[in-house]
Image: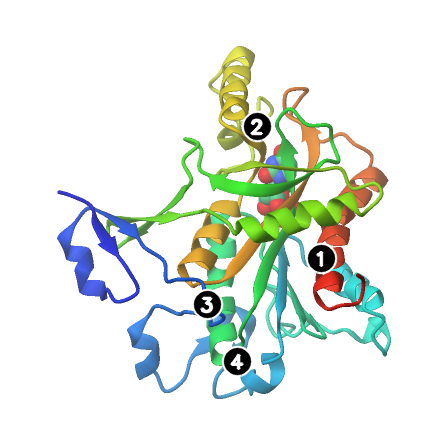
Amino acid sequence: MAPILLNSMATVTDLSQSEFIIHEPPLVTDQVHVMNPHLETMKEDILYHFNLGTNTHNLPEMFGDIKFVCVGGSANRMKSFAQFIHQELALSGNIDDITDICEGTDRYSMYKVGPILSISHGMGVPSISIMLHELIKLLHHAHCHNVVLFRIGTSGGVGLAPGTVVVTDKAVDCFFRPQFDQVVLGKVIIRSTELDEGIFKELLQCSSELDNCPTVIGNTMCTHDFYEGQGRLDGALCSFTTEDKMEYLRKAYNTGVRNIEMESTVFAALCRACGLKAAVVCVTLLNRFDGDQISTPHDVLVEYQQRPQVLVAHLIKKRLGLII
Ligand SMILES: O=P(O)(O)O[C@@H]1C[C@H](O)[C@@H](CO)O1
Ligand SMILES: O=c1cc[nH]c(=O)[nH]1
């Protein structure tokens, strides 16, 4: 069967027409596009994994001023980022008073600092995907506009010195395709993972204004596993040789891949499909051509993890007019 195009006007019944559906996003506007007609018919929307809801919380009052959302795997990192950005923006109040908005659940942590939301997403595509569905609905219910999302994460480098920050040009799957395949009702919806060129160029400019923040633009490969899926030789299972691994990494490098992580494709695809501008900024913890184990001392890893935070904070401060 031929693929069909699914755009913002399509209804779910269109899925019966094809095995493969290529998703066409709405034009990027200042609005958050939730492309789900069922939402309008619901009396209440419970954002279960955030422990928030439209009838229990005044979402426009709580979140209506949000302009930047920063997400990353670890709850501690996202709390540290909230405290860091609070200091960077020189806001009043004590950083110890920044509390977890999602404290009623331990699925995700969420902190709000001025117009910035900092949220953890756990590891891997399913975890970040659930968080993003609820986040995008939250932004919609709160009537937010002109919001930019950043993933600030860690990754394995491909041919880069450890500690290099990679700002993603295209998020690619393990076949090096710039797409995210979502299975819906037993059929595959293919969504583009292209990111906003303006933001990644702005991030590169910001990096040139910072010390100790080596940054490159490159493709980021998203896998569904840290071990076999990323061609590691040190998992509990391994069915390939060192040469097989090196050949795959060389192939990845030659297609433009500079780092490997586990969330970028669905992050890019969902943001794009909902008309949201987004960027992926991940530091490399090791060079995968040199090994698989992450043996760098803890204090060095902590400093590496701060680099994407410093870079994104710099862009936010510039956009808020706090630095020229
Ligand atoms: O945001 P983080 O640092 O969690 O991203 C990467 C990808 C996986 O979630 C995890 C694997 O260690 O790190
Ligand atoms: O090698 C790495 C390091 C961090 N995160 C990954 O997904 N892979």
User: Which comes sooner in the sequence, label 2 or label 1?
Assistant: 2
User: Which comes sooner in the sequence, label 1 or label 3?
Assistant: 3
User: Which comes sooner in the sequence, label 3 or label 4?
Assistant: 3
Tell me the CA gap for discs 4 and 2.
43 Å
Decide if residue 285 is on the left or right side of residue 151.
Answer: right
Circle 3 residue: 29
- Residue 174, image quadrant: top left
Circle 2 residue: 235
Q: Position of residue 156 (x, y in %)?
A: 63, 33
Decide if residue 244 is on the left or right side of residue 190.
Answer: right
Q: Residue at x 47, y 60 (%)?
A: 130
Mark 1 or mark 4, whichever is nearer to me: 1
Q: Residue at x 40, y 35 (%)?
A: 177
Q: Identify residue type, mark 2.
A: Gly
User: Which comes sooner in the sequence, label 4 or label 2?
Assistant: 4
Tell me the CA gap for discs 3 and 4.
16 Å
Could you tell me if residue 293 is visible in this image?
Answer: no
Q: Are marks 2 and 3 in contact (CB under 8 Å)?
A: no
Q: Are marks 4 and 2 in contact (CB under 8 Å)?
A: no
Looking at the image, what colour scheme do you see?
rainbow
Q: Secondary structure at mark 1?
A: helix
User: Which comes sooner in the sequence, label 2 or label 3?
Assistant: 3
Q: Position of residue 103 (x, y in %)?
A: 65, 73
Tell me the CA gap for discs 1 and 4.
24 Å
Mark 3 or mark 4, whichever is nearer to me: 3
Circle 4 residue: 142
Q: Identify residue type, mark 1.
A: Leu
Decide if residue 90 is on the left or right side of residue 142.
Answer: right
Circle 1 residue: 315
Q: Secondary structure at mark 3?
A: loop
Q: Position of residue 93 (x, y in %)?
A: 85, 78
Q: Residue at x 85, y 41 (%)?
A: 299
